[in-house]
Amino acid sequence: MKQVAIFGLSHFGKSVLEELIRLNVEVFIMDKDRVRIDQYKDLASGSVVIDVLNVENLRKVLPESTDAVVIDMGNSIEASILAASYCAKLHIKTIIVKAETESHGEILELVGATQVVFPNKEAAKRVSPLLLSSVLLNYLPVSGKLVIAELAVPDSMIGKTIMQIELRKKYGLNLISVRAPDAEFGEFNPAYVFQKDDVGLFSGTDEALGAFAGYIVKEQKRNALQTQIFKLFRRKDKT
């Protein structure tokens, strides 16, 4: 079983702890705040109240079997840099550190961090598209510019198969699965004919998905305008 040490129990560190516990990973937690340690020590396989900004302190308390460390020093950029540097000196193979800014991340990599995480940026990437598009139901950044998103299937796709739509050729997207409202995603059959109110699970770059979501919104507005014009002419015909 892998053993992970978490330095600092701010929001990101606590979230990682809870997820690792759910996955039955042995976690050793360290923080200089006794209240935080007392709050989570029953969940962890080991805990200690300690100022991690001392390499000798770390050498004494950090289990030799530690496979990876996760560093979350809150808003203290200097503390996270020092902690990452000390872990590198102790030859920890995997050092994951929460960063506040791009420049902070670059320094962390220079001192030995093997992976830099920008939770605030990832949260922004998740939330922003949801605010901007009513047709985008869920949005998950995967890596780099690759994202997976749930999108309402546009009217122009209804009654057609994925081969007829040429989704990859026209929009640079892949369709992973499709579901009806209030249903779950399942194995996708390329011969499936899209129905009204279907929801698709698409993958592609954030730019491609953004452009496709924009296309759907424009289509909805165009269809709404055509409906208004049709109703207007019907009223005129009746008079």
Image: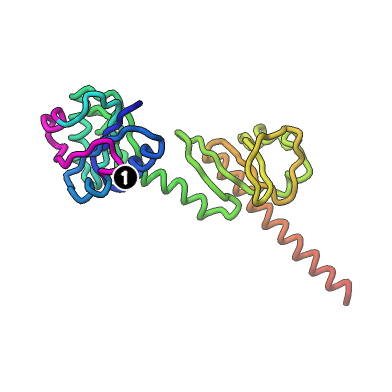
Image x and y of residue 175, in percent: 64, 36
Question: Observer-nearest residue: 10 or 137?
Answer: 10
Residue depicted at 54% across the width and 47% down the height: 138
| Residue with the mark numbered 1 | 14
Measured as percent of width and height from the top left, residue 42 is found at 28, 43
| Quarter placement of the N terminus | top left
Looking at the image, is 197 positioned above or below residue 62? Answer: below
128 up-or-down from 8: above or below: below
Residue 49 located within the stretch drawn in magenta? yes
Q: Residue at x 22, y 32 (%)?
A: 84
Residue extending farthest bottom: 239
Q: Residue at x 36, y 46 (%)?
A: 120
**Label 1 is placed on what type of residue?**
Lys
**Residue 173, quarter of the rendered image:** top right
Asked which secondary structure carries label 1, the reply is helix
Q: Residue at x 68, y 52 (%)?
A: 219
Q: Give the residues in magenta.
A: 41-60
**139 sits to left or right of 54:** right
Which quadrant of the figure contains the C terminus? bottom right
Most extreme residue toward the right is: 238
Percent x, y of residue 11: 31, 48
* Image colouring: rainbow
User: In this view of the protein, which residue sits in the foreground, 95 or 25?
Assistant: 25
How dense is the environment of label 1, judged by Cα within 10 Å: few (below 14), some, or many (20 and up)?
some
Please give left or right for residue 218 compared with residue 66 in the image. Answer: right
The one nearer the camera, 185 or 206, is 185
42 or 156: nearer the viewer: 42
- Residue 53's spot in the image, x, y percent? 14, 37
